[in-house]
Image (cartoon, rainbow, N blue to C red):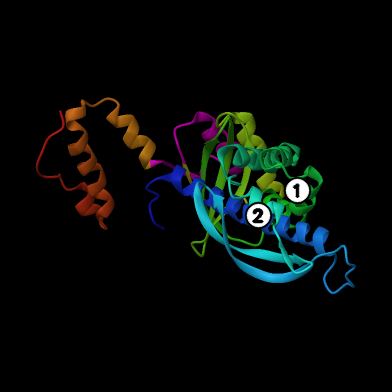
Amino acid sequence: MKIIKNRIEEIREHVNSGMREAALKLIYGLFTQELQELCGAKHSRKGEELATRAGSDPGSVFLSGQRIAVKKPRAKLGGKEVELESYGALQSFDLLCDKVMAHMLSGVSTRNYDGLLDEVAGSTGLKKSSVSKAFKKGSQEQLDKINSRDLSKHHWVSMMIDAVHIGDYAVVVALGVNDKGKKHILGLKQGATEDWQVVRDLFRNLVDRGFKTQHSLLFVIDGAKALRKAINKYFGKEQAIQRCSLHKQRNIMQYLDKKHHMEFQRRWRKPRTMKTLLKTTKPLSAGSVN
C-alpha cells in the first residue's frame, strides 16, 4: 500500500467527491421538479395551460467555483420557449460553496438537512418546498449512505482519520482502504476537533455498521491523543498506528531555521523513494542541518 503523502488532502478529496455527486443529483432534481410543475407528469395528457417538454440543450452551472457542463432541459408553451427558473438561479449561485457544503456535512452528521434546504432556497430564490422535493429524490440518499452503508462486506486494511474544516463547521472523517486498494468514506461526525467523545461516537457508528475489529489494521493519524485513545479502546492496543508524515514534517520544520527548510525537505522526501531498508538507512550525502 502506498504511503499517504498528504492525508488531509486525500480525505478532503473523497469528501468533496461525495458532496459533488449529491449536488449534481440536486441540480437535476430541481430541473425535473420544475419540469413536472410546468408540463405535468411524463406521457400524461396536456391541457392548454401546461407546457410541453422539448428535449435539452448543453448548459452549465457553478460547482466549487468552476463551471461544469449539464444538460439544460427545455419546455415550450404556445410555441415559445419557457425559461427554467431553477436553471437561471444556478447561473449565479455555487451549489458547492463553503456555506452549502458546511450544511451538507452537518446534515450527514446530524441527519437534519433543514439548514441545507434553507440555505439553498434562500440563496437561489426558489421555493423551499420545491428544493425539498428535489433533494429527497436522490441527494439525501447519496448523503445518508455515507453514514449508513454496510461496512461488513469489505475486508478493511487501513483507516485514515482527520478533521475537515469547511466554513464554520468541522467534522471528523474516517476514510477506509480495503484489501483491493479502494478507498471509501466510512463515516463522519461533526465536532470542532478530534475530540475523544466525537471520535468515540464515530467509531461506535462504524462498529454498529459492521466494521470488523478482530484483525490488524493500519491507522494513519496526526498526533492527537484522542485518536490514539479511541483506537486503543475500540480496536485494541496492538494495532499499528502511523503518524501522518505531513503533520510530522510540519512539526519538525517549526524547530528549524528557515534557511534549513529546503535541505530538510530534500532529506525528508528521499527515503520515501527508496525500496529497501539498507538504502533507507544509508546516510544521505550533501548539505547539513544543524
Report x, y in % for residue 160: 50, 46
Q: Is residue 240 magenta?
A: yes
The kind of residue on which mark 1 rests is Val
The kind of residue on which mark 2 rests is Tyr
Q: Is residue 267 magenta?
A: no
Please give left or right for residue 174 compared with residue 4 in the image: right
- Depth check: give the residue in front, 229 or 169: 169
Q: Earlier in the sequence, mark 1 or mark 2?
A: 2
Q: Which residues are magenta?
A: 221-244
Quarter of the rendering occupied by the C terminus: top left
Helix, strand or loop at disc 1?
Answer: helix
Q: Which residue is mark 1?
A: 131
Q: Which residue is mark 2?
A: 87
Tell me the mark number nearer the camera, choosing from 1 and 2: 2
The answer, for residue 218, to whether it is visible in the render is no
Helix, strand or loop at disc 2?
Answer: helix
Q: How would you rate the neighbour count of disc 2 (Cα within 10 Å): few for under 14, some for 14-19, many for 20 or more?
A: many
